[in-house]
């Protein structure tokens, strides 16, 4: 299937705007430690994950960033996938005490810039938008794929 002219433009130029972090915040590449990851998911409203699963999964991250404020990690995001054909953006989470300052936008911006600067050719970038987060992702060129495709998932929980 050929990409439309609009899709090709988005992928070749990357995000049209730059979303820097506010003063007092800084990026660190990589993912936070497992306990911090679990804490950020829980307090930001994402589904909590078991520590053993987090410890097994985080090392397989293709690219991750986290945001620090002083000595505290207050935000994170990462990309997973095969690095050439498919990328899935996950774990965009910001501590509620630091929300409303553009930190989530800056995290998505950093991940999208990384993707656009490192992909070998075309790549399909997907994500799942919880609640109203789709408004954030639309600013980066993401769009609802329904009815052409339907996101599907299954939770498998080992007792």
Image (cartoon, grey):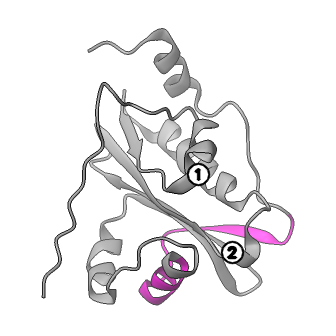
How many labels were placed on the picture? Answer: 2
Quadrant (top left, top right, bottom left, bottom right) of the C terminus: bottom left
Q: Residue at x 45, y 41 (%)?
A: 118
**Residue range of the region highlighted in magenta in the rendering:** 23-40
| Mark 1 or mark 2, earlier in chain | 2
Q: Residues within 10 Å of mark 1 (few under 14, many from 20)?
A: few
Residue 61 placed where, x, y %?
36, 64
Residue 7 bears which disc, if any? Answer: none
Rate crowding at label 2 as few (under 14), some (14 to 19) or many (20 or more) other CA atoms within 10 Å.
few
User: Is residue 146 on the magenta stretch?
Assistant: no
Q: Is residue 74 visible in the rendered structure shown here?
A: yes
- Specify the label residue 96 is tagged with: 2
Q: Residue at x 50, y 27 (%)?
A: 11
Quick one: SS at disc 2?
Answer: helix
Q: CA distance from mark 1 to mark 2?
A: 15 Å
Q: Which residue is mark 1?
A: 132
Which quadrant, please, contains the N terminus?
A: top left
């Amino acid at each position: 299937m050929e990409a439309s002219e609009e899709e090709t433009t988005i992928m070749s130029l990357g995000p049209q705007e730059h979303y820097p972090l506010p003063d007092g915040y800084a990026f660190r590449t990589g993912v936070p430690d497992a306990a911090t990851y679990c804490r950020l998911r829980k307090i930001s409203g994402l589904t909590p994950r078991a520590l053993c699963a987090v410890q097994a999964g985080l090392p397989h991250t293709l690219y991750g960033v986290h945001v620090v404020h002083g000595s505290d990690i207050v935000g994170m995001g990462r990309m997973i996938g095969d690095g050439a054909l498919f990328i899935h953006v996950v774990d965009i989470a910001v501590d509620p005490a630091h929300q409303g300052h553009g930190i989530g936008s800056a995290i998505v911006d950093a991940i999208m810039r990384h993707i656009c600067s490192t992909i070998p050719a075309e790549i399909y970038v997907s994500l799942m938008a919880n609640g109203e987060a789709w408004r954030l992702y639309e600013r980066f060129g993401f769009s609802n794929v329904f009815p052409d495709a339907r996101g599907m998932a299954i939770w498998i929980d080992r007792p």
